[in-house]
Image (cartoon, grey):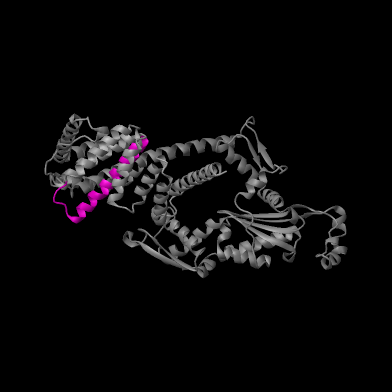
Amino acid sequence: EAQQEWMDAAYAAGVQDVQLVDRSVAYQAAYARKFPQHTDKYVMIVDMGHTETTVSVLGPEKTEEEKEGEETEKEEVATEENSADAKNVQSTMKVLACRRQKGLGAGVVDVRLWKHFQSTKLQSLTPTSRAGHRLLAGMTKLKQLLSQLPEGSVTVETVGPNDTDVTLEANRQLLVEVCSKDVQALTNLIQETFKAANVEPSQLYSVEVVGGGCRMPWVKKVIEQATKMNTLSYTLDDTSAALGAALNPCPVVASRTAGVDPTDEQLALRSAEETMAKLDHDLRLRSGILNQMESHILGLRSAKHEKHGDLLPGDLFTYLDALEDWLFSTEAEEASYDALQSKWQEVRSKTDELSKSYNDKVEAERSAKEAEMEAEAKQAQKEREGQEDGDEEDHDNRRLPKKRRMEIVMKNKNEGGELFSGGNYKFAAARYAKALSHCAKFVDLSPEDQEEVNAVKLTLNMNLALAYLKMKNVDQALRYANDALVIDENHTKALYRRASVYYEKKNWDGASKDVKKALKMTPDDKALLKLQEKVEGQLKRQKLKEKKMAQKMFG
């Protein structure tokens, strides 16, 4: 039945070719591959996933003669188990027994905690409500905390009376108490597996634990007590089942190929899966429109506190209040994608109408500012280009406010960045140089303002150094790298930039000096370390060359 469920699920998911391998057999194959010297041992594997737990016992596969003589030889083997002479046969490992229990897993712990706190503190919550879902998510976090700490607490939003936040505390003892049925179920499952395998706990060589559920302290303790093992092994992991399944031979318990006609149930499952996929797609589209509406509301509410916000009428905010109520209504929750699109168009039209005075004022101001910036750009374009690579004179000597002058600086700097990104290094350098020239025209700066301007100047000088380096004009690159270090002699990026220029100029000593100075401040900088390696390589080659020349000169 379980095998058929997997085959049906694979078809529903669109997987045509399927080979089903028993997980316990896959673990056995992976363990034997990793530890071939232990195939004559008894090993238990406990795998606790989210909703199911599997317990397997692996052991040596005995011949018929060994089985018949097992009882008579038991005492002799026990007294000589440490002797190599007692092992006359190299055994092959197999799965001796395997037991599974659905509903016993890490996920059930979340439910146990949910029921505990719902019954003791939050009786009004229901499992299908949004608040109930938030509480379940909080219980998952609390479980994870208790897997690492003896006690923990989580705050779950809007689950208390009047949508208040509630802080819930628990410790590991409480976790054991609420999971008492699961403690007993896991103990019974292990004992049943021992019995089915005809193996005693004292015969175990090791216990391998796999799966997220086995990270919980109470689960570890139950396994240790039931197996009488003080130490659990973690040599297998979540990839071990896949490894074992890929090994050859690993017996296939069920298979299906693309050419096999699906059953009626499989067709029904595929249809249901496609329907759910369509619903998920529709839900994503609907959520996108709802998010746009919420963002639109937030933006308009924020605009009230910005420049010209007094132009927004009270009717707009009355409309936004009603819109917010609608967003959290049953009508909005059940609305189709087409209905939401229509609502969104209506919202934009209505808010544009109510905020027309504000929008017109903001747009007019933006257009005027763009026009002013464009005029300045055209003026800069007309300036004389006779000087080298953009170092032309600038005739703008207006006493502009610091904010206005900085806007001009940043506009030129940003334009230079765009040109540089497009590989237009010459024109990028011209924009950077223009920005730098405007940096010299600030007036009446406070110490804080001067520090801000210096930071921009430093960046512009480094950008110019890099642009000229790209154009192979190393002398100009060195000039701007030096200017950057005049502003801040310990700036690591400026030191890196000048070291790069020195490297191109084959000034290995200068490059080495700057790199070493920068590495004292940022010893883990990858770019500096890479440049240092290159410089040291050149220094070694230079010394070797000088040594060979000296040998040649002096015989």
Q: Which of 527 and 312 is in front in this view?
A: 527
Residue 395 appears in the rendering: yes
Residue shown at 51%/66% (left/top)?
175
Q: Position of residue 54 (x, y in %)?
A: 64, 55
The answer to whether residue 175 is above or below residue 440 is below
In the rendered image, the residue lying farthest to the bottom is 173
Q: Position of residue 521 (x, y in %)?
A: 39, 56
Query: Is residue 396 found left or right of 179 in the rendered image?
Result: left
Residue shown at 19%/30% (left/top)?
384
In the rendered image, the residue lying farthest to the left is 399
Q: Does the magenta stretch include residue 450?
A: yes
- Tell me the quarter of the image containing the N terminus: top right
Q: Where is residue 158 in the image (x, y as percent from the top left)?
A: 35, 58
The mark total stands at 0
Residue shown at 82%/66% (left/top)?
78
Query: Is residue 251 found left or right of 161 in the rendered image?
Result: right
Q: Is the magenta stretch mostly helix, strand or loop?
A: helix
The answer to whether residue 393 is above or below residue 97 is above
Q: Nearer the viewer, residue 265 or 406?
A: 406
Residue 389, quarter of the rendered image: top left
**Range of the magenta residues?**
442-470
- Tell me the quarter of the image containing the C terminus: top right
Q: Where is residue 200 in the image (x, y as percent from the top left)?
A: 74, 64
Q: Which of 537 and 398 is in front in this view?
A: 537
Residue 336 appears in the rendering: no
Residue shown at 85%/63% (left/top)?
71
Q: Is residue 33 magenta?
A: no
